[in-house]
Image (cartoon, rainbow, N blue to C red):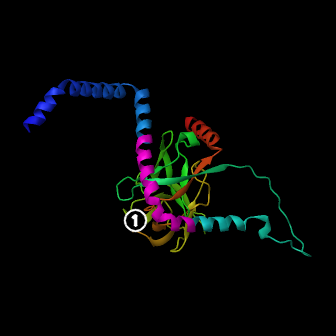
Amino acid sequence: MRDLFRFLYRIRNTLLFLLLMGLSIAWSIAGNEHHKAEALGSASDIVGRIYGWRHAITSYTDLKRINEELARENARLKDLERHAYVPMAERWVRVNDTLYEQRFTYLTAHVVNGTFHRQRNTLTLDKGSLAGIAPDMGVIGADGIVGVVTGVGRHFSVALSVLDPDWNTSVIVKRTGHRGLLAWDTGEPRTASVVDIAKHAPVLAGDTIVTRGEDGIFPSGVPVGVVTEVTDAPGSNYHTITIRLSEDLTRNGPVQIVRDLFRSELDTLTHVTMDQ
């Protein structure tokens, strides 16, 4: 112990210098918003890179499941190719032809780290601003919605998971078209609730819940979950609906980040409406 004190005494000037430098950096960041933003972005990249290294090591144990998901997706895409169809001979066919304009683009990323047992849960993705990722982009998994991007570094980004009680997205009952909001208030990673659907709406166990779209985050019709229970509390005008989420948010894996090409127009119109 005496030798330790002697050593610390000999390097006291170096320790004092490091302490003062750390304090000056902290004060500089705290007093300047630009420096603060740069520091947060750098920290996000550093943490993301660490998670990326860990994900690269552990992902080999999950290759079988990922390959199965990719095989299903490839099969679905092949079903849409021209060679999967044959001409309809000697039949009259009415064709209602419509021109389409692309609204959504997709970028593949991987979840390198995620939480599902906290009060607020997030995901770290291995794509950042250099890949074109920006806040408020939706994140979709192989089976359903995952979350929305909230923070972006150069090489990594952070998304707010569906498993967050403060985040809601607009959904509909696929069978009837009745609208509601997705809310995570169950405390369980595989279930959530749908709120604000009036009692007169015929919602049944087994109904499929999908995204409504029109919010600039998700396209319409993306799977959200399946209704497992519908109860009507006395004195309430709305159903209490519990669903089982389509996407398993307890596992890491490939995801699609959604960019809405109409988002700026939608935001502009929304701001104009609010200002009036």
**Residue 163: image x %, image y %?**
42, 57
Name the residue at the left extreme.
2
Residue at 51% x, 39% y is 154
Q: Is residue 159 left or right of residue 274?
A: left
Please give left or right for residue 21 compared with residue 252 in the image.
left
Please say if 231 is above or below 115. Answer: below
- Rendering coords of residue 105 (x, y %): 65, 49
| Viewer-side residue, 87 vs 175 | 87
- Front residue of 266 and 8: 8
Question: Residue extending furthest front?
Answer: 3
Question: Which quadrant of the view contains residue 209?
Answer: bottom right
Q: What residue would you read off at disc 1?
A: 235
Question: Residue 6: percent from the left, percent from the top?
Answer: 11, 31
Residue 120 lies within the magenta run: no
Count residues near mark 1 (Cα–Cα under 10 Å), then give few for <14, some for 14-19, many for 20+.
Answer: few
- Residues rendered magenta in the picture: 45-68
Mark 1 lies on a secondary structure that is loop
Describe residue 150's horizontal placement relative to residue 212 as left or right.
Answer: left
> What amino acid is at disc 1?
Gly
Corner quadrant of residue 9: top left
**Residue placed farthest to the bottom in the image?**
90
Q: Is residue 52 magenta?
A: yes
Residue depicted at x 55% and y 71%: 207
* Image quadrant in which the N terminus is located: top left
Q: Main secondary structure of the magenta part?
A: helix
Task: Inspect this view and state whether residue 180 appears.
Answer: no
Q: Is residue 50 visible?
A: yes
Quadrant position of the C terminus in the picture: top right
Compared across the picture, whether 45 is left or right of 10 comes to right
